[in-house]
Amino acid sequence: MLRRLKFLMVLLTLSLVLAGCNRVGLAYRNLDVIIPWTLNDYLDMNAGQKSWFNDTLKEHLAWHCTTQLPGYLDWLDRLQQMVDSNQVTDAALQTRTVEAKQAIAEIAREITPSAVQLLQGLDDQQVKDMSDALAKDLRKRQDEYLKPPLAQQIKERAERMSKRLDAWIGPLSPGQQNRVTAWSAELGAQNQAWIGNRAHWQAQFIEALQQRHNADFPQKIQQLLVDRESLWTPQYRAAYAQTEAAARGLLVDVMAQSSPAQRLKLTQKIDKVRSDFQALKCLKSAQS
């Protein structure tokens, strides 16, 4: 649940460039509705908790818009410069990735004290309900990503990536599609490491939640949210580096094969994301 909250806050910023959302401004302006609605899948808050959460969320969103979004605009500028100069290289993508990770970590650090306060106030039934909801979510992901035969997992992963790329650069050429297929095959059974690590994180989160009145609870949540890499399983740690490198290689090769029309569409998409952010009232207020 907490990871879902954190990623929702950044999903509609940095990650939108790769995720394919065309209504960035609309989505961002409605985060105060989207986040509580999503949180309801995991936690049934009482009236007092809802009131506190809504007030706290507004403060976090105001902080995010006024202090973080300006940096995202700069990040989009650097991304567009890569495209315009046809310099989508492995080194450049590594730099953009590091910048994105730093932005995510900044959000995690910001929301952790509020997360600790919310979680410490849960009663035993709420903790049980959250545990059940997380277990249900995990089973759903296992059914979707692990139960199908490996060949089907690879095929579906390639289809998801093709759809994302199509949203940003248009229909793929046969060569680009072949590269996506090869990328997915290269990852093989990566779903196993990913879901296994997710299960590992959820188990540690629930264990910490059951001891939420202990003195070291804030430190445990800090590790779970901010220093989550320290809790990765060995299998996922090994797979992650390979997965990240494979993704960069795919993007480099797809862009190397891109047509002028595809590059133009990508530039227009980035322009649209930038314009949506610049139109936000909270950002305009911060810049005035």
Image (cartoon, helix red, strand yellow):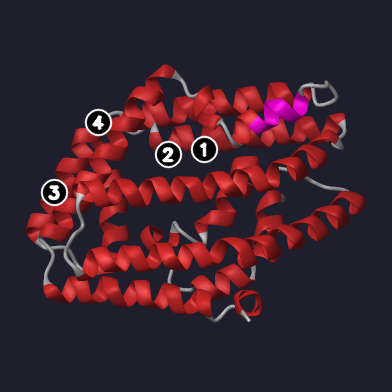
Q: Which mark is residue 25?
A: none
Residue 20 spot, x, y in % from top left? 38, 64
Kind of residue at disc 4? Gly
How far apart marks 4 and 1 lie (CA) works out to 20 Å
Q: Residue 130's quadrant in the figure?
A: top right
Residue shown at 57%/61% (left/top)? 68
Provide the residue designation for mark 1.
Answer: 140
Residue 1 at least partly seen = no
- Contact (Cβ within 8 Å) of mark 1 with mark 2: yes
Magenta-tinted stretch? 217-222
Disc 4 and disc 3 in contact, CB within 8 angstroms: no
Q: Which residue corresponds to mark 3?
A: 179
Foreground mark, 3 or 1, reads 3
Q: CA distance from mark 4 to mark 3?
A: 15 Å
In this rendered view, identify the residue nearer to me: 261 or 154. Answer: 261
Would you say the magenta stretch is mainly helix, strand or loop?
A: helix
Q: State whether residue 129 is above or below residue 82.
A: above
First in sequence, mark 2 or 3: give its number.
Answer: 2
User: Does dot 3 land on a helix, a strand or a loop?
Assistant: helix
User: How many residues crowd around disc 2 within 10 Å: few (fewer than 14), some, or many (20 or more)?
Assistant: few
The structure residue drawn at horizontal position 28% and vertical position 50%, both measured from the top left corner, is: 93
- Give coordinates of residue 248: x percent, y percent: 25, 46
